[in-house]
């Protein structure tokens, strides 16, 4: 875990099971599903239900704690996450339990699964123009001429890229940066201390050839850790941390 502890303020490891058709389970099935997790994680005791604008059911630990777990059931997605886990293994253990229990408890057929997502999220705090600091750290040198000028100010720079790592393009990776600076903050020069986020997602599109969720997930974690270790941290996270430190 040392590859992000010193550079970011919060770290997330999330899992999504995305479906083609609505899951269509009853509230009783959702409660049963959540209760199965409460037996393992008794501190997951906060329940929320939302009908509009999206149908969603949530079970989570205390979000004010330094680290916490959460689960959601939505119309076309079952998700889980661990914020600031003590280890990757801790986060993965929650995901594995979801992959084991959700298909049975929520009656999710493998025929209805569109894709699995494994997301690593990095939050970094900066009291200033997020888009400007991201551009300083990551924009190609060819952009410098475009931005030259005494009144030029960057108001949006959120790079993202998606690439496949297999011939069939069934395994795709996406890097996306989400900034949270507003135009009124830029024009006034008054910035809140807020976080911007770097998301790296490994998506496995489902196919009948896949043997099971657990084998696919093991392959996804290997891909995710390798790219985060070799590419995301040294080439994205560290330059961003250095740009923030230089301000």
Image: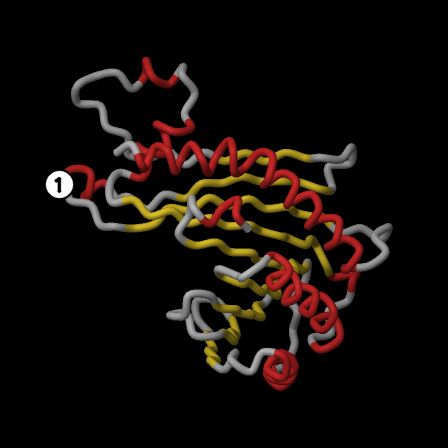
Q: Residue at x 48, y 80 (%)?
A: 47
Residue 183, image x, y percentages: 23, 40
* Residue 104 as seen in the image, left or right of residue 12: right
Residue 236, image x, y percentages: 48, 34
* Residue 112 as seen in the image, left or right of residue 133: right
Label 1, secondary structure: give it.
helix
Q: Residue at x 43, y 74 (%)?
A: 62
Q: Residue at x 66, y 40 (%)?
A: 226
Q: Quadrant of residue 150?
A: top left
Q: How many labels were placed on the picture?
A: 1
According to the image, label 1 marks what residue?
A: 188
> 55 or 11, which is in the foreground?
11
Q: How many C-alpha atoms fall within 10 Å of the one at disc 1: few (<14), some, or many (≥20)? A: few
Residue 114, image x, y percentages: 70, 54
The image shows residue 240, relative to residue 26, as above or below, that is above
> 104 or 223, which is in the foreground?
223
* Residue 159 as seen in the image, left or right of residue 189: right
If the image is split into quadrants, where does the C terminus sit?
Answer: top left
Q: How is the image coloured?
A: secondary structure
Q: Quadrant of residue 63?
A: bottom left
Q: Residue at x 54, y 61 (%)?
A: 86
Q: Quadrant of residue 13?
A: bottom right
The image shows residue 97, relative to residue 180, as above or below, that is below
* Residue 108 as seen in the image, left or right of residue 142: right
Residue 148, image x, y percentages: 26, 16
The image shows residue 163, relative to residue 9, as above or below, that is above
Identify the residue at the far left of this view. Answer: 188
């Amino acid at each position: 875990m040392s590859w992000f502890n010193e550079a970011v303020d919060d770290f997330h490891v999330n899992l999504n099971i995305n479906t083609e058709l609505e899951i269509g389970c009853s509230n009783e099935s959702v409660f049963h599903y959540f209760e199965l997790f409460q037996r393992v994680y008794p501190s997951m005791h906060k329940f929320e239900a939302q009908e509009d604008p999206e149908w969603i059911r949530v079970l989570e630990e205390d979000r004010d704690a330094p680290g916490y777990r959460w689960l959601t059931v939505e119309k076309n997605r079952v998700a889980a996450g661990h914020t600031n886990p003590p280890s990757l293994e801790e986060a993965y253990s929650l995901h594995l339990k979801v992959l084991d229990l959700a298909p049975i408890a929520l009656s999710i057929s493998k025929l209805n699964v569109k894709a699995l997502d494994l997301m690593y999220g990095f939050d970094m705090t900066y009291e200033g123009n997020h888009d400007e600091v991201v551009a300083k750290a990551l924009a190609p040198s060819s952009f410098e001429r475009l931005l030259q000028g005494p009144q030029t100010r960057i108001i949006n720079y959120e790079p993202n890229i998606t690439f496949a790592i297999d011939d069939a393009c069934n395994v795709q990776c996406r890097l996306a940066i989400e900034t949270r600076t507003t135009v009124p903050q830029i024009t006034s020069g008054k910035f809140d201390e807020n976080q911007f986020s770097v998301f790296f997602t490994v998506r496995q599109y489902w196919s009948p050839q896949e043997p099971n969720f657990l084998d696919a997930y093991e392959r996804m974690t290997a891909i995710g850790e390798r790219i985060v270790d070799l590419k995301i941290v040294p080439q994205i996270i560290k330059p961003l941390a250095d740009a923030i430190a230089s301000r």
